[in-house]
Amino acid sequence: MNTEIFTNPIFIAVAAVLLIVAVAFLVYFFKNRNKVNALTEEYSKEKQGLIEKYESDQEEERLSHKKEVSTLNEKYHNDTTLLNNKLSSLRQFTVDKGEYLTDLSLIQLKERLVRDEKIRESDMYILSNVYLPSRNYTNTRKIDHLVLTRTGIYMIDSKYWGGHILHGVNEENFNSLPYVESFFDLLDLDKAKEQTLIFEKADDRNVSVNHYNHTIEETRLSAEKLKNILKLQYDVVPMIYFNPIDNGNYSITNYSADPSIKVLVGEEELENFFLKYVFHGRFQYTVKELDEIAEEIFSLNP
């Protein structure tokens, strides 16, 4: 082997240059590899950040859209429910002015509570002219008004009367009201049961006496039947509401000894009852349960 090549100064110089270049390249490569890795990692982080931001923006947009749709659906439901209530009241007005006025008072009360943000639209249903059918259709019961709230269900028997009313009187009141016994005899009323007597001026010389038999008993039975039909967990609260005719000359005295039925007189008492006892009570139903109860009642009254 010719060793002169390796000892040739030119060869040695070229080899030295190549070695220097190789060393320089390796130094440059290892020196910049860390920069390349750093840039690659920075790019990966930036890419991941963009992906996460995109996904976050998409999720936020989805939730915002879902909330908007939910709000629109709730508004549609509330508006249609309120409109149906008002239409129902207008239809009812042609049949019974007293029940219409009671229904109107309840609707206005709900509107005010919603406007004052004390309740939501979905927290209260107002239904009127509800019928509870029986199997043989001979004992169908009519309920004037139903108020469904989260704190309970209230059944209102609305009376649109004038004159002077003695409510819940029986033989136990004869000592303090001696004249009442004669009317029991005249009208052949059961003295042991609470009755309602209405005294009205017939003309300048005469007074008419009417009676409403078994008001309390019938109201209680309707409330119990409603609870059984709907399979409710809690009792339905029966109420008797005397709505004076055109706020004219009237008086009412409640002698009823039955505390299970609320007796209210006039729009102010009706509103105060719901404000005091209904919306400060313990929740019994969820909004979803109220919807289901209302739907079941609608199915009974197609």
Image: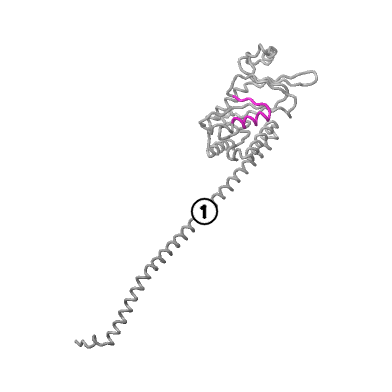
Q: Is residue 288 left or right of residue 10?
A: right
Instruction: Say which of 12 and 63 sits in front.
Output: 12
Query: What is the residue that sits farthest to the right in this orientation?
Result: 204
**The quarter of the displayed image where residue 183 is located:** top right
Rendered view: 153 above or below 38: above
Badge 1: few (under 14), some or many (20 or more) residues near its Cα, within 10 Å? few
Q: Say which residue appears at 67% left-offset and 37% top-offset.
A: 108
Q: Is residue 271 magenta?
A: yes
Which quarter of the rendered picture does the N terminus lie within? bottom left
Which quarter of the rendered picture does the C terminus lie within? top right
Query: Residue 55 in the image: x percent, y percent?
Result: 48, 57
The residue that disc 1 covers is 60
- Identified by mark 1, the residue type is Glu
Instruction: Say which of 283 and 264 sits in front.
Output: 283
| Colour option used | one colour
**The quarter of the displayed image where residue 279 is located:** top right
Q: Is residue 159 left or right of residue 291?
A: right
The dominant secondary structure in magenta is helix
Query: Residue 141 in the image: x percent, y percent?
Result: 60, 29
**The quarter of the displayed image where residue 203 is located:** top right
Query: Residue 38 in the image: x percent, y percent?
Result: 40, 65
Query: Residue 252 in the image: x percent, y percent?
Result: 69, 22
Q: Is residue 242 magenta?
A: no
Rendered view: 9 above or below 28: below
**Which residues are drawn in magenta?**
261-277
